Image: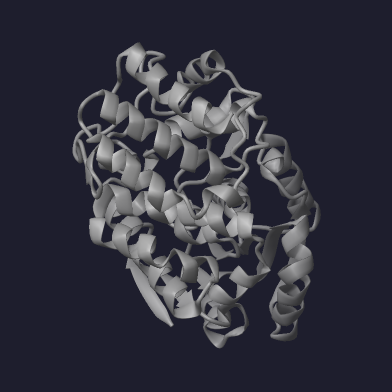
Amino acid sequence: MESVRIKLGGDYNVHIGSGLTSGDLLLETLKPLGNRFAIISDSRVVGLYGHQLCARLKNEGLNSTLFEFPEGEASKTRETKARIEDEMLAAGFGRDSCIIGLGGGVTTDMAGFIAATYCRGVPAIYLPTSTLAMVDAAIGGKTGVNTAHGKNLIGVIKHPAAVFIDTDTLHSLDDREHAGGIIEAIKHTLITDRDEFQRITEQAKDILARKPDVMAAVLKRSSEIKRDVVESDEHENGRRELLNLGHTLAHAIENKSNYKISHGAAVALGILGEAKMAAENRTLKEGAVTEIKAALAPYLPLLDTDLSALSADELVDAMTLDKKSLNSTARFVLLKDIGTPLCETDRPAVSLPAATVRAGVDYILDEFS
């Protein structure tokens, strides 16, 4: 087992290894956190791991209840949050509760948001079961829900008491889900670590095969990168914006496709589109755009990247509603080189001329429509 310490929210550990959801460390971590445990999970993960985890906790004397919601990004809403909270209240959960987020990024966002507001705040533990949640959503404290106006527009910063990344759960993912998560790991390397970018590029075959030692190393380094960025700017007042590389365009793609295009696919497209914007802006060489596209190439065929139903105008308009926007103007994280952002301090996201933005949007529409 490997562990990464995060010095936020009272400090917590991200544990990475095989069999962690069935190990003693999870029980030792949970017992001081509450008298009742609400396991929040989606309908798919409940069948894979939820009933088993709930039974195990009960066998160990921990009063546990499952709270389930329908699988998918469409469930990440204020309505779902309120329904789960009402169910917890009806079941008698009080301030002595601890919430366990078992599942992917939708679940950890939802569970963390509930933990932040339920009885004015209760502890949370995350057990991410998707690659995307392991490298991104479970680390850093962001929680939130979507609205008709955009993604993750309502939420708070709430750090968990611990994160347990059980690499065994990777084998329950289909190739599309796994590939989508790796896109976020590649994003992390693009903003900080060219050497790791090169390693991920060279190890694509082993990563897709979920080779345990390779995946453990990728997950650990990705956790370290996110930790370093988040610790320097917990509330996204500056450097943390770097983690949004590709996301301004990605969130517009997700929103305008009604989330039919997954987050991982949208981020891959967003990274390419925003890299093209950087090249058009003459901050990034065209050769780097080609190199980034090559690194993403093994994963793109596994993802839902058909943009034929979307238009450039609607994507450009949707980007003005991104949470990084200022004065209704979209802002983007640009690269100077692979592993080196254009700006690391103050507000790394910048506005761009309309023609530059349109060039990036047109680039991905031409490639993927």
Q: Quadrant of the N terminus?
A: bottom left
Q: Report x, y in % for residue 44.
A: 76, 59
Does any portion of residue 159 appear in the rendered image? no
**Residue 37 or 296: which is nearer the viewer?**
296
**Residue at (53%, 13%) from the top-left corner?**
313
Q: Is residue 189 left or right of residue 115?
A: left
Asked whether 14 or 210 is in front, the reply is: 210
Residue at 65%, 63% in the rendered image: 173
The image position of residue 244, as x and y in percent, is 38, 39
Residue 139 left/right relative to 106: left
Question: Residue at point 26% right, 40% down?
Answer: 287
Compared with residue 317, is residue 207 higher up or lower down, i.e. above or below?
below
Image quadrant in which you'd find residue 253: top right
Query: Can the viewer see residue 352 in this picture?
Result: yes
In the picture shown, does residue 157 fall above or below 101?
above
Q: Is residue 347 left or right of residue 120?
A: left
Q: Nearer the viewer, residue 144 or 87?
A: 144
Q: Determine the image quadrant of residue 363.
A: top left
Residue 290 position in % (x across, y down): 34, 42
Is 27 rendered above or below residue 335? Answer: below
In the image, what residue occupies the spot 48% across and 57% down?
Answer: 182
> Is 126 left or right of 292, judged from the image as shown?
right
* Percent coordinates x, y for residue 330 in the rendering: 39, 21
Q: Which one is in front, 171 or 10?
A: 171
Quadrant in which the C terminus appears = top right
